[in-house]
Amino acid sequence: AQSVTQLDSHVSVSEGTPVLLRCNYSSSYSPSLFWYVQHPNKGLQLLLKYTSAATLVKGINGFEAEFKKSETSFHLTKPSAHMSDAAEYFCVVNYGGSQGNLIFGKGTKLSVKP
Amino acid sequence: EAGVAQSPRYKIIEKRQSVAFWCNPISGHATLYWYQQILGQGPKLLIQFQNNGVVDDSQLPKDRFSAERLKGVDSTLKIQPAKLEDSAVYLCASRDSGAYEQYFGPGTRLTVT
């Protein structure tokens, strides 16, 4: 079955240190991949997307992710965490192109300590 | 560009009552989705519309949930009668034709007591 796995349910970092949120997908087809962020009591906001162009994708708020086909990974990184980055992050995969549905990971809660 | 609008933002009802949620997608977006997000989980697709037609409702509990998208713009999701396990955030999303990404509204937080 097509799936996406977020390897950590909770990540805690100190402000100013790097952020790494890990995501792996099943390799049946070449997928489109996304990272969404959800702040408390807010909807989901698109951070970045990969749709078979450049493998290193830059998103909003200084986040970026690298598509690695050999590792079936799409990890999210940021060089320096900010307090406002504290939120839930979802790795999302779409195997059906523009007609496909999104399959969500279970989410990673990012905590940022002062 | 205005985002996806949803109302109400919060709703508290007793079990066996009915409730309806409303969604207005981004202007011009033909595809509209309703998701259910239970606390601590990722969103789960309930139903997908393309214009005013249903594309996928395989995960919609049709004995109690219904949805419509008259005129291919706004949509309503209804639950009747509600159960305790329906307590969740109901998210609406829309997608432009040919695009891959979806844009989400702020959600409606439903509490069933």
Image (cartoon, coloured by chain):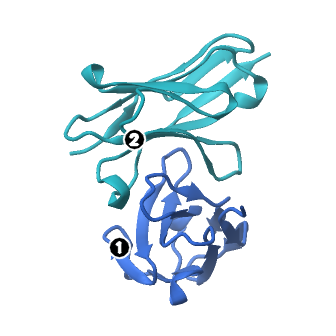
Chain colours: A cyan, B blue
Q: Can you identify the residue that label 2 sits on? A: A51
Amino acid type at circle 1 is Asp
- The chain letter for the residue carrying disc 1 is B
- Residue reaching furthest to the bottom: B71
The secondary structure type at the circle numbered 2 is: loop
Residue A7 seen in render: no
Q: Nearer the viewer, residue B27 or B37?
A: B27
Tag 1 and tag 2, C-beta contact below 8 Å: no
> Residue at 45% across / 56% down in the picture?
B99
> Residue at 37% across / 57% down in the picture?
A98
Q: Can you identify the residue that label 1 sits on? A: B57
Q: Nearer the viewer, residue A18 or B9?
A: A18
* Quarter of the rendering containing residue B78: bottom right
State whether residue B9 is above or below residue A65.
below
Image position, residue B52 (x, y; %): 45, 84
State whether residue B48 is above or below residue B95.
below
> Residue at 44% across / 81% down in the picture?
B64
Image position, residue A111 (x, y; %): 67, 25
Image position, residue A67 (x, y; %): 39, 26
* Quarter of the rendering containing residue B29: bottom right
- The chain letter for the residue carrying disc 2 is A
State whether residue B29 is above or below residue B20.
above
Amino acid type at circle 2 is Thr
Q: Nearer the viewer, mark 1 or mark 2?
A: 2
The secondary structure type at the circle numbered 1 is: loop
Q: How many marks?
A: 2
Residue B92 shows which numbered tag?
none
Quadrant, the N terminus of chain B: bottom right
